[in-house]
Image (cartoon, rainbow, N blue to C red):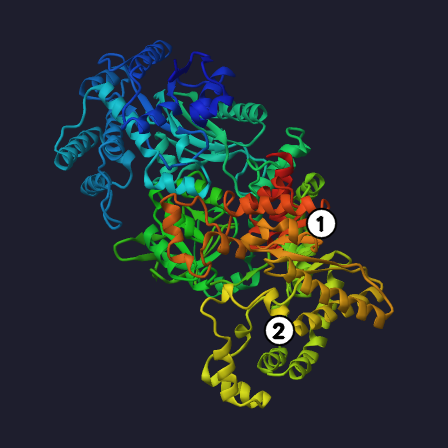
Amino acid sequence: MSKYVYFFGSGKAEGRADMKELLGGKGANLAEMTNIALPVPAGFTLTTEVCTYYYDHDRTYPPELKAEVNDAMRRTEAAMSAKFGDPKNPLLVSCRSGARVSMPGMMDTVLNIGLNESTLRGLIEKTGNERFAWDSYRRFVQMYGDVVLGLKPQSKLEIDPFEQIMDELKEHKKVKLDTELTTDDLKELVKRFKRAVKERTGKDFPEDAYDQMWGAIGAVFGSWMNDRAIVYRRQYSIPHEWGTAANICSMVFGNMGDDCCTGVAFTRDPATGEKVFYGEYLINAQGEDVVAGIRTPKKIAELQKDMPAVYKQLDDIRGVLEKHYRDVQDVEFTVQKGKLWMLQTRNGKRTGFAAVRFAVDMVHEGLIARDEALSVSRIPPDDLNQLLQPIFDPQAKRQAIAENKLLAKGINAGPGAATGRIKFHAEDAEAWVHKHAKGDPEGRVILCRRETSPEDIRGMQVADGILTAFGGASSHAALVSRQMGKVCVVGCNALNIDYAKGTVTVGNKVLRDGDWISIDGFTGEVVAGQVATKPSEVVQVLIDKSLKPEQSKVYQQFAELMSWADGVRKLRVRTNADKPKEASAAVAFGAEGIGLCRTEHMFFEGDRIDAMREMILATALDARKKALDKLLPYQREDFEGIFKAMQGRPVTIRTLDPPLHEFLPHQPDQQKELSAKIGIPVEVIARRVQELHEANPMLGHRGCRLGIVYPEITEMQCRAIFEAACIVQQGGTKVEPEIMIPLVGFLPELKAQAKIVHETAAKVFAEKGATVPYLVGTMIELPRACVVADQIAKEAQFFSFGTNDLTQTTLGMSRDDYGSFIRYYMEHDIVPKDPFQTIDGDGVGGLMKIGVERGRSTRPDLKIGICGEHGGDPDTVKFCHKIGLNYVSCSPFRVPIARLAAAQAALGK
């Protein structure tokens, strides 16, 4: 029979840290902290199996659950020397969610459960603090009314109904802070809150303690399937079927007076990675006050002055936890009447900057081994991207400040530089970004909020940066932005944000919805307008050579981590590059070759497009060859530059792939301009454009089909490749060209093109009196090519999966047109991820497996790689490792990400 409830308290717990799948992260760590003798209030955890049962059985519970909960409650009462629901010695509890993977703020929490008119009197008698008791009661009614009874704003402009009632009372009483309200004020608030509950729901606020607890448990389990939790799980690939645990924990109070406090802290700085105690606390407050960001808290270092003994104990626990878990911890604590209680610990969310520094420093400290430092739980590969993104140009920022554009300075919570349009609401930010093409600078957004809540998750996902007027470094905005790798500035109190007017005001400066604003996540500065950026420190060292390695700690740690990754990975990492500059950048980032050089991109440079158009417009072979002769020196020069940049590394060059009509002008005025330039009548040009028109060009006359019908094109390109190779080799640089024939589906297609390659190579080698080693292979981008890979491998010396087209042809989905429905597909769990960003493992991936197995059945030493856009996606990299590919190829700035992902794949991490 299943056990559904696990108790913790009095120094012993039924659970352990390694039971996260069953107890969730919060429950497992509460148990673990109890077992290692840290001060944890007693309580119990309802397992994730209860949650899955709840959804599988029409939101009902297992029959035996109630008895288990009652038994655990009796044990909790004994441990805390109080009784739940007792009017004289009341025990109050909280109910918190806790999935096996931390989902900060995405699900619900209820505090002070068990308070009613009778237990309230007992709490007053027990503590001798009437104001504290009424403050706790008004918080409970407010939170329970929101989370369990559903009294929430109904539109983006509506104020929270409870906050509105409180604001009206504070205005009437002429006070600003909650702490300035008297006991009588709090009594009045409770009365008004309960009246609002009755008016909105038609029911009285529940008085029975157990009814309150079961209502909260249902709300916590119900929150597993709320919109923000679903959106978050999709973003981080957390399965919906995991479910959440629910934790019932005895309440301890940070709001009983000035010898009480509540706080959130990290054992190291989660933004920069510096080894300092980092966090915040509020005197005379409850935990939600810190995270919600409604009051700006004190820095944790100030606790040493306010409560020196507590600070020392907390700092000691910091060391215990980090040593025990061997990772940076994010802790919640409460001090009640001078006694410290630990309410939570979990591995801290961190920026990419911090993740790298944590990993490298902890290896040097002997806390972890190198292999562990490389794990995906410590450094998700995409987080490295933060180290490569631009920063504000100091000169441009100084100029903006000199022009009086500096608005304010807040707390730097997420490093980086972000410029975007102001949007005040999550749905507006999402709509604005989706209205613009990906990468369009006009589509950049800064989400500006008084404070964020979990309801803002969609806006936070799409925003380039997040700016809040309230909150500190442990607020919701700070926590979530760090995990997402977003630039973030919080606690910028000088900002007056008016949602109704759609304005942010500082003094006499007013910015409106849609205006440009810039935020510096390194310094906390907020600047009106756009500020120019410059490359990151890593890019300055590797690419621009404007910074020396010893001048950048960020680069040094990045380089050390990358060397560890290179030492364990099996997959090689190449780059997709068409120009020497791109190739050189990729090599600086660690690329070991070029996996895709697209020759068609070269034809658009300068005057060569005219020669290309002459070739396409030619009606006779001699005329085509004459035009191709003009292109030959251009192509040769391009390949010379790339071979030199790659310094002996392999270079895979794809012969011409796009349909010819893409190179011709389609507008009448452009056709007239071309006619005047090359002397071909405009009518001939227009007719040729019409002749080349295709209803579905992606499946039309392109790829190897062009080279078969027009073999002179392939011959010219191969001559350019081999002449360039001979020239560079004779100059003392090793070359390793690999000629890749695209869109092959039939063995005779590859044979025909390979014959031209070999014949051209022989001619050039004879002319130059030199030979260079080369390979001829094909791009596998059609389902048929995968199925008959054993046949194609008879001729091909290597395969490279062109997964962009392989995805299109396998799924019957056009990457140019799928944007109209793919978001709907992902949001309704039809597909788990965008198949053009992460390989569809079952479909496209299944065909790739067939291609690998059948290709190597013919040619066991067949070299196989991937060169589609998927090559820089960490999940795809790991899939490629799993099916035995030799390399992945991606854009230059994705090379470090692929290197780390390949190491994690090799380590099984």
Q: Is residue 81 left or right of residue 832?
A: left
Residue drawn at x 78%, y 57% is: 648
Q: Secondary structure at mark 1?
A: helix
Amino acid type indicated by mark 2: Phe
Dot 1: within a 10 Å radius of its alpha carbon, few (fewer than 14), some, or many (20 or more) residues?
few
Residue drawn at x 53%, y 64% is: 396
Identify the image quadrant of residue 477.
Answer: top left
Q: Earlier in the sequence, mark 1 or mark 2?
A: 1
Residue 56: mark in rendering: none
Spatial CA span between label 1 and label 2: 41 Å
Q: Is residue 581 left or right of residue 397?
A: right
Residue 494 visible at all? no
Q: Does 860 appear above or below 543?
A: above
Identify the image quadrant of residue 604.
Answer: bottom right
Q: Are marks 1 and 2 in contact (CB under 8 Å)?
A: no
| Residue lying at the far right of the rendered structure | 769
Q: Secondary structure at mark 2?
A: helix
Image quadrant holding the C terminus, namely top right
Residue located beneath label 1 in the image: 550
| Whole-percent x, y for residue 88 in the image | 23, 12
Q: Does 315 appear above or below 480?
A: above
In terms of depth relative to the viewer, which is nearer, 501 or 886?
886
Residue located beneath label 2 in the image: 603
Image quadrant holding the N terminus, namely top left
Residue drawn at x 67%, y 69% is: 714
In terms of depth relative to the viewer, which is nearer, 522 or 793?
793
Q: Does 861 appear above or below 802?
A: above
Amino acid type indicated by mark 1: Glu
Residue 566 visible at all? yes
Q: How many marks?
A: 2
Dot 2: within a 10 Å radius of its alpha carbon, few (fewer than 14), some, or many (20 or more) residues?
some
Residue drawn at x 46%, y 12% is: 12
